[in-house]
Image (spheres, coloured by chain):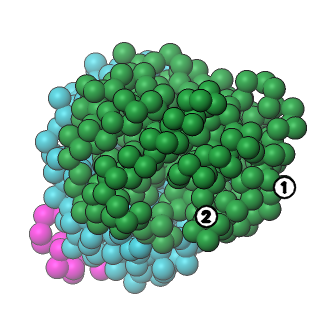
Chain colours: A cyan, B green
Amino acid sequence: MLPTKVSIFEVGARDGLQNEAPVTTADKLTLIQQLADAGVKRIEAGSFVSPKWVPQMADSDAVFQQLKHQINRQSGVVYSALTPNLKGFELALAAGADEVAIFGAASESFSQKNINCSIDESIARFIPLIEQAKKHNIAVRGYVSCVLGCPYEGHINVSEVARVSEILYQMGCYEISLGDTIGVGTPTDARKMVEAVANVVPVDKLALHFHDTYGQALANILACLETGVSVFDTSVAGLGGCPYAKGASGNLATEDLVYMLHGMGIDTGIDLAKLALAGDTISRALGRTNGSKVANAIRA
Amino acid sequence: MLPTKVSIFEVGARDGLQNEAPVTTADKLTLIQQLADAGVKRIEAGSFVSPKWVPQMADSDAVFQQLKHQINRQSGVVYSALTPNLKGFELALAAGADEVAIFGAASESFSQKNINCSIDESIARFIPLIEQAKKHNIAVRGYVSCVLGCPYEGHINVSEVARVSEILYQMGCYEISLGDTIGVGTPTDARKMVEAVANVVPVDKLALHFHDTYGQALANILACLETGVSVFDTSVAGLGGCPYAKGASGNLATEDLVYMLHGMGIDTGIDLAKLALAGDTISRALGRTNGSKVANAIRA
């Protein structure tokens, strides 16, 4: 059974832009405003990480402060921030983020190489963050990376994806977003992985976050739609790239997913033409080709 | 039930290159040789149409004449030529094509605007060609265009796709290739269309030829795989474009399909690394970015 309605969690302004050349704060606010105008209800608008590590997100505080005053702030749009630790959470809270996101990896090597500690240690560090979030009534989303493969160890067991997902869910994350960080997955594996996680986390608490490095993301989502998952993280204009494969594609383009879903009679609440406008505008600001085939076809 | 084995009908040297800037005959022969080296067994190598209409295919005679002497000619590779009429067929025969392809549209407007006659008239004109082909024991493939939409009339009824497909099959085409010429289709419609055609033409005589204009081709193929179709027309490096949408994508990239199929445990007989080499080589000759995400990811 296909869902009749799907929720898009737009990550272009964070996961997309953090892998692009820097843009101005004004460009980001235009992007976020145009996304909201298009009907996108969940927007990851920045991250509170060290600007030393991710200079593209150095102005996230300014972005959220400005969003406080934007008109769409009042119309049911949720603006989310990625927060790697308690300090990041406090900054996000002060800046006015509606919700925050934390992350764990399904790959031990990835965790060690990226944050220099084990998967379990990395997750344990989020306990004080989640406590504070509860106190302030801020929802916490959990990302799990490398769910279909790891740049260091290759194959990842679905049992490990399920284990990490369950821990994050039990800790209090309201939704678990399963990330194919390097975009290597294919449909049969993607579906099996989701089915395994759905045994330990309710399927309506799952989201899929598939990068399009190997052009498989849309097919993988199609394969998973029948499991009952109905939340998908995508980037307008296919913003972003892959830090593990220079020159490769970033997240799945939101436009291409919305086009498919609408064609299948599945509602997203998004106006595709307005969405494509948002992607064209930020692509021009970046001086890059729009990575959405739908957007390029519409414009042509 | 998914197929265990899929056959790739590579159309990059014809459908792809006819929508690109011209390349030399030597470039085409390198492409075709590299495709054969990668294990591709069915290669559309050119078309015998007026060079006034398609200047990129003006050297098809030279291409086929040279192929006669190539080593892979003897290793079970079938080289096909598109032939719009009896004259084209005679040229293809003389040049040594192994098989030929003819075409009909599922859209009356498309037929009228493109070849200035009705669908039925256009198909009737192929009767003498098919007679000659039978006499010379040359297999004839049938293309049906606009199966999921038309640039002029939009929606196309699946009953019309089925009708035209059945006529071409009854006339003697050994395989019917269903083309989403403008790449507008989405998975549910694609599958319904194939199921409708499979009611009148045996499913093992069907092929799918999906352009990736809206980024849907791979998902559409995934949706159709369970109908039993196991032949897919694709272009290495996503060669080609869309004459109805300048700047839009061409055929689905062969590499991206092969990657998906192999990931799903479906055999293609193709060496993906060698295939990507063929795509990189022709992309360099064209001075264009490789349109295959898999190829770009592998290179990175």
- The amino acid marked with disc number 1 is Ala
Q: Quadrant of the C terminus of chain A?
A: bottom left
Residue B192: x percent and y percent?
A: 24, 35
The tag earlier along the polypeptide, 1 or 2, is 1
The lab-note entry on whether marks 1 and 2 share a chain reads yes
Q: Residue at x 75, y 63 (%)?
A: B23
Q: Which residue is mark 1?
A: B26
- The amino acid marked with disc number 2 is Ser
Q: Which mark is residue B50?
A: 2
Q: Residue at x 74, y 39 (%)?
A: B96
Bounds of the magenta segment: A63-80
Classify residue B214 by image quadrant: bottom left
Tell whether position B2 is magenta: no
Residue B213: x percent and y percent?
A: 43, 58
SS at mark 2?
Answer: loop
Residue A206: x percent and y percent?
A: 28, 36
* Residue in the foreground of this view, choosing between A110 and A135: A110
Chain to which the residue tagged by mark 2 belongs: B
**Neighbourhood count class around disc 1 (C-alpha, 10 Å): few under 14, some 14–19, many 20 upward:** few
Q: Residue at x 52, y 42 (%)?
A: B129
Seen in the image, is B285 located left or right of residue A16? right
Q: Residue at x 54, y 19 (%)?
A: B5
SS at mark 1?
Answer: helix
* Residue in the foreground of this view, choosing between B67 and A9: B67
- Which numbered mark, 1 or 2, is in the foreground of this view? 2
Answer yes or no: is residue A175 visible: no
Q: Which mark is residue B98?
A: none
Chain to which the residue tagged by mark 1 belongs: B
**Neighbourhood count class around disc 2 (C-alpha, 10 Å): few under 14, some 14–19, many 20 upward:** few
